[in-house]
Image: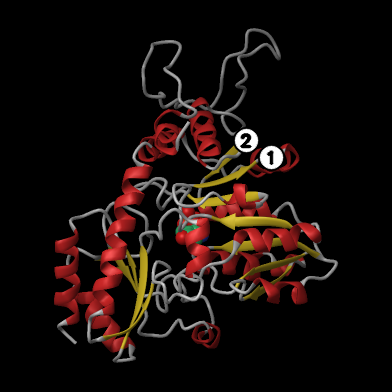
Amino acid sequence: MKFGTKAIHAGVEPDPSSGAIMTPIFQTSTYVQKAPGDHKGYEYARTQNPTRDALQKSLAALENGRYGICYASGLAAMDAIVKMLKSGDEVIGTNDLYGGSYRLLTKCYGQFGIKSHFIDLTDPKKLEGYINKNTKLLWIETPTNPMLGIVDIKAICEIAKKHKILTVVDNTFASPYLQQPLDLGADIVMHSCTKYLGGHSDVVMGAVITRSKRIADKLYFIQNATGAVPGPQDCFLMLRGIKTLHLRVQRSSENAKAIAEFLLKEKKVSKVYYPGFKTHPNHKIAKKQMSHFGGMVSFDLKANTFAAAKKVLKGTKLFALAESLGGVESLIGHPASMTHASIPKEDRLKVGLTDSLIRLSVGIEDIEDLKADLAKALSKL
Ligand SMILES: *Cc1c(COP(=O)(O)O)cnc(C)c1O
């Protein structure tokens, strides 16, 4: 099955009790058994739920995986993965990681003896120098947030395999429509479904997808034992969102390309970060591992101050000032004070995350309106 067909059909069957074409919202906490142990595969809703099952199958299909497991949020999904480690193990992650992922690794797991190193994975050659016998997990984000760096998933996974290190790709920014990391050698794909998969800014959810039964069994155990499961209403909304994933991400990507080109010509803009540009340092890898360059664009201002950025951030009407990304509506954000405020300033500046950097999540509105909105905000500088 091709991607668009999978987005609509994978995992979902008409409901056998009624013929309902849409998977019902099974709003129940428990299931009746005929005799002890004699049941239909469902015992208690922390462990299994039919609405969640349909979604998990859909997600597994979209990522070309075998097992999908959903969580109450993207960070809960990450938390479950990190719980597979033990004290003394070490993690290597991308250096401009999503702020919440950085916080989880350093502030929550650092105190349990799990050490994390954050390095520039856009150059695979640097990786081997950081690997030691305790390195157990490699955490890749690509495109990175908010600098839109590109990590060569295949090259990194090959190095990790040599050292028996588990690789995880946080595929939130690309979505499975643009990039399928399991095909490139990753062991696990993680998603904040809150973003492109849901796509309508109305659900918080996370997911993990893998082909390995061993990993899936560990994660099922952790999901059941620690309980960060999503509710059936949210699973229903996620299934509904996924049905248009290919259309939405396609349009977002086309709009983002047009916005990036527009910003490049703007006199008040000093830099545009967009992996679709031939001048982007890892453009060739982006072209190889992604089918499009995605809906995210970051840019910096010639007036290199937070005050200038504030003017632009307050000046747009269609681009709403908000955290998050991947919805049908365009958003504008200020990483230094919003999503990445938990990262120390000197670490931020090292990767180019200045006080005047602005991040856009380009939605699926009409492009002329989006350009006009940004032009007006920039004219206030
Ligand atoms: C939002 C986000 C997360 C966290 O997901 P939540 O659903 O907000 O918990 C993790 N990684 C990336 C890249 C994100 O954008």
Q: Are marks 1 and 2 in contact (CB under 8 Å)?
A: yes
> Which residue bears the numbered disc 2?
66
Task: Name the image quarter holding residue 304.
Answer: bottom left
Q: Is residue 335 left or right of residue 229?
A: left
In this rendering, the answer to whether 29 lies above or below 77 is above
* Residue 136 in view: yes
- Label 1 secondary element: helix
Which residue is depicted at the point 68% across and 58% down? 157
Residue for point 45% across, 25% down: 12
Task: Give the total of numbered labels.
Answer: 2
Which residue is at a point 57% across and 40% down the rendered structure image? 64
x and y percentages locating residue 339 in the rendered image? 43, 70
Quarter of the rendering containing residue 302: bottom left
Distance between mark 1 and mark 2 Cα atoms: 9 Å
Q: Which residue is mark 1?
A: 216
User: Is residue 200 visible in this depiction of the protein?
Assistant: no
Q: Quadrant location of residue 46?
A: top right
Q: Give the camera-side residue of 89 and 112.
A: 89
Q: Secondary structure at mark 2?
A: loop
Amino acid under disc 1: Ala
Residue that extends furthest to the right in the rendered view of this protein: 133
Q: Position of residue 55 (x, y in %)?
A: 49, 34
